[in-house]
Image (cartoon, rainbow, N blue to C red):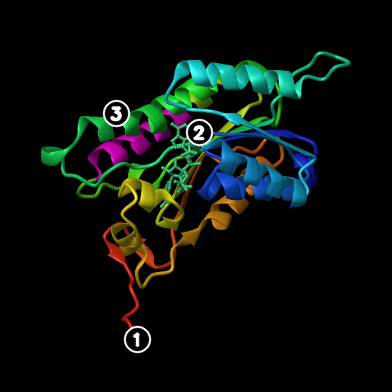
Amino acid sequence: MNRTRLKNKWVLITGASSGFGAAAARAFAAEGSKLLLGARRVDKLEQVAAAARRAGAAEAHCHPLDVSQTSSVEAFVAWASQTIRDPQSDARILDVLVNNAGGAHGLDSVAEGKDEDWENMLQTNVLGILRMTRAALPLMVRQPGGTIINVGSYAGHSAYEGGAAYCAAKAGERQITRSLRLELSGTGLRVSSIDPGLAETEFSLVRFKGDTARASKPYEGTHPLQAEDIAEIMVWVASRPPHVNIDEMLIKPVDQAAMHKVYRRPRG
Ligand SMILES: NC(=O)c1ccc[n+]([C@@H]2O[C@H](COP(=O)([O-])OP(=O)(O)OC[C@H]3O[C@@H](n4cnc5c(N)ncnc54)[C@H](OP(=O)(O)O)[C@@H]3O)[C@@H](O)[C@H]2O)c1
């Protein structure tokens, strides 16, 4: 595996304050990449940036980002553009964009659904990717080997009760990824969707609005994916030779044979 391709490359990660995004920061750091990290919780971001420096990042910078607000996305990308600027040539080249920010809110049926939850999921998981990509593309175009990684979900492939808006959002992410790949044909940029199944992050805590008892249920008795499993795959995708595009990857824990078939070990 030729990972030296990522050394000193600029990697922008959204949702880098926890879960897959924080693990991705550490994993790209270990390749010697230069990091631009965004999320709303800046205190957490600063901790992730410090850990990334210790893990070998050539540079690690962070800035507040709310992907549900166009003004925030534009301010973030303006900061990123200034941060990556080469003072000699004035060139500003972003090598890897990881559109990871997102998540689920609630597990209500459509009949019981809340506008706020639906809007939140579509704002972050769908419009967030569109906004970030639109803003960052000028820093990436016509650059062979440049990579956009969108984080989708098994939920974009398979539906479940209470998941209508989240499944729709992640199915939307897959179609955005496919459209973008067509639109960028000929530019040398590649576009991938990484679609995890059950993974132990803050995802469930966010979905159940801080209810730790409910949040731990999906992981009971089973062996879920860890954030590092997905981060390692992001690094692998971004370090393929420039002519190789990994279109889509569906990654599930062995215990999750299907959406509704998760093996759970008996207690004791
Ligand atoms: N865990 C799973 O089982 C699983 C499976 C498939 C796909 N996914 C997807 O994986 C991605 C990462 O989730 P995770 O599992 O790592 O969960 P997580 O630990 O909750 O991380 C979510 C990240 O997204 C950020 N975020 C949320 N809303 C944001 C916004 N409006 N603007 C900027 N950042 C925002 C959060 O940061 P702040 O709160 O600090 O803003 C956090 O850094 C999400 O797209 C999620 O849908 C998760």
Q: Residue at x 81, y 13 (%)?
A: 90
Q: Earlier in the sequence, mark 1 or mark 3?
A: 3
Residue lying at the far front in this picture: please name it: 43
User: Whole-Å distance between the Cαs marked 2 and 1?
Assistant: 40 Å
Q: Secondary structure at mark 3?
A: helix
Query: Mark 2 belongs to which amino acid?
Result: Arg
- Residue indicated by mark 1: 268
Residue 171 seen in render: yes
Question: What is the magenta range?
Answer: 163-178
Q: Kindly report which numbered mark, 3 or 2, lies closer to the viewer in this rendering.
A: 2
- Residue indicated by mark 2: 40
- Residue indicated by mark 3: 119
If the picture is divided into quarters, which one holds ligand 1? top left
Label 2 environment density (alpha carbons within 10 Å; few <14, some 14–19, many ≥20): some
Label 1 environment density (alpha carbons within 10 Å; few <14, some 14–19, many ≥20): few
Q: Secondary structure at mark 1?
A: loop
Q: Secondary structure at mark 2?
A: loop
Instruction: Decide whether residue 176 is among the magenta residues.
Output: yes
Q: Position of residue 211 (x, y in %)?
A: 31, 54
Q: Kindly report which numbered mark, 2 or 1, lies closer to the viewer in this rendering.
A: 2
Residue at disc 1, CB closer than 8 Å to ligand 1: no
Q: Residue at x 29, y 36 (%)?
A: 168
Q: Residue at x 37, y 64 (%)?
A: 219
Q: Is residue 66 left or right of residue 141?
A: left
Q: Nearer the viewer, residue 17 or 172?
A: 17
Label 3 environment density (alpha carbons within 10 Å; few <14, some 14–19, many ≥20): few
Residue at disc 2, CB closer than 8 Å to ligand 1: yes
Q: Are marks 1 and 3 in contact (CB under 8 Å)?
A: no
Query: Mark 1 belongs to which amino acid?
Result: Gly
Residue lying at the far left in this picture: please name it: 111
Image position of 228 with respect to 48: above or below? below
